[in-house]
Image (cartoon, grey):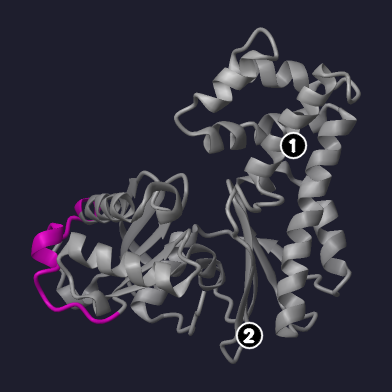
Amino acid sequence: MSLSLREIFVGVDGGGTHTVALVGRRGDEILGRGGAGPSNPSVVGFEVAAKQIRSAVEAALVDAGVPPLDLLFAGSLAPGQLTLGIAGTGRPSDRARLTATLATELGLPPDTLRIVTDVALLLPAAGVSAGVALVAGTGSSAFGITEDGRTAIAGGWGYLLGDDGSAFDVGRRALRVVLRAVDGLGPPTQLATAVEQHLGVTQPRDLIRVVYQSSSPRSTIADLAPLVVATARDGDPLAQQIVTRAGEKLGQFACAVARRLDLDDRSPVIGTGGLFQAGDLILDPLRKSLARVHLADFRLLDREPAVGALRLASGEVRLEIGG
């Protein structure tokens, strides 16, 4: 494939679990895709994040059949031609630090890169210019933008300080319900058997070892979310309460952003993240929360978030996103 430098745009979506890079042209034509490990600098550090991003971008270039990274970027890239939405970069200082670290890693001028917080990719990915983006993955957050470029964020505090309504939150609450039942402080629950089987333990006290000695306790706990949903579908009331609460908390994030930005009832709420696979168990309480501020247009994102980064890189979508 013979492509000039100006024809190539690169969009990256990086989070606490994995990183996805897309190489494409204008008009959503995706030429190549690459993946790597987590690139949230709050989780893995700035240097590791930069290396993961480089790995994903290089893989996408190889997949697209275009020149390798060193050769491609030896030319003159336009500002923003490489646009990245990276979790853990909500603060301007964090974006500036990752920009500098990544520019060094890639051998590029810093102004070539544009970094926004990952949740800011969702609206461009959906082709929406204003509204609220809602993330319910390992972590949770909401991001809103108005037609005149005002922005607001709710959530995104990370698993130690927040992440209500996330997969991690659901998994942690399930563990607490199980341990309360073991201690005789709460009612019995089917979650006990489900959790023990999933984690491969034969007695509750072994959960201490499995969780605390895990290479990634956050991921170990978040990975429990699907079995909590399955247990809720089987009729366990405590599991149902956990999933319902998650939907309510996610709705509260979106409502808070909408109120702060004075968004009207025509504003869409775009959702993405693995927890939405719970279907109506989580969507019903979420929609009830949204209805309190008359937000009725909720939809799940039907494109991967990295498409939003690619659209921003190519200039197809122009949003002044503060993150």
How many numbered callouts?
2
Quarter-of-image position of residue 184: top right
Task: Please state, as top left, top right, bottom left or bottom right, where the N terminus lies in the image.
Answer: bottom left
Can you give x and y, in whole percent of width and height, for residue 165 in the image? 71, 50
* Residue at disc 2, secondary structure: loop
Q: Name the side, left or right, on which 314 lies relative to 212.
A: left
* Residue at disc 1, secondary structure: helix
Q: Is residue 95 above or below residue 150?
A: above
Indicate whether residue 72 is drawn in magenta: yes
Q: Name the side, left or right, on which 156 lies relative to 87.
A: right
Can residue 300 be seen here? The reply is yes
Q: Residue at x 77, y 23 (%)?
A: 179
Can you give x and y, in whole percent of width and height, for residue 108 in the image? 17, 70
Category of crowding for the residue at label 1, using alpha-carbon neighbours closer than 10 angstroms: few (below 14), some (14–19), many (at least 20): many
Indicate whether residue 5 is drawn in magenta: no
Q: Nearer the viewer, residue 100 or 76?
A: 100
Most frequent secondary structure within the magenta stretch: loop
Q: Name the side, left or right, on which 240 lies relative to 19.
A: right
Q: Is residue 204 above or below residue 40?
A: above
Give, as a single range, the part of the protein colored magenta.
Answer: 62-79
The amino acid pointed to by label 1 is Arg
Q: Is residue 232 above or below residue 106?
A: above
The amino acid pointed to by label 2 is Thr
Residue assigned mark 1? 173
Q: Residue at x 57, y 26 (%)?
A: 211
Q: Name the side, left or right, on which 242 lies relative to 50.
A: right
Quarter-of-image position of residue 28: bottom left
Q: Is residue 6 above or below residue 125?
A: below
Can you give x and y, in whole percent of width and height, for residue 155 in the image? 65, 62
Can you give x and y, in whole percent of width and height, for residue 196 in the image? 67, 16
Q: Nearer the viewer, residue 109 or 226?
A: 109
Residue assigned mark 2? 146
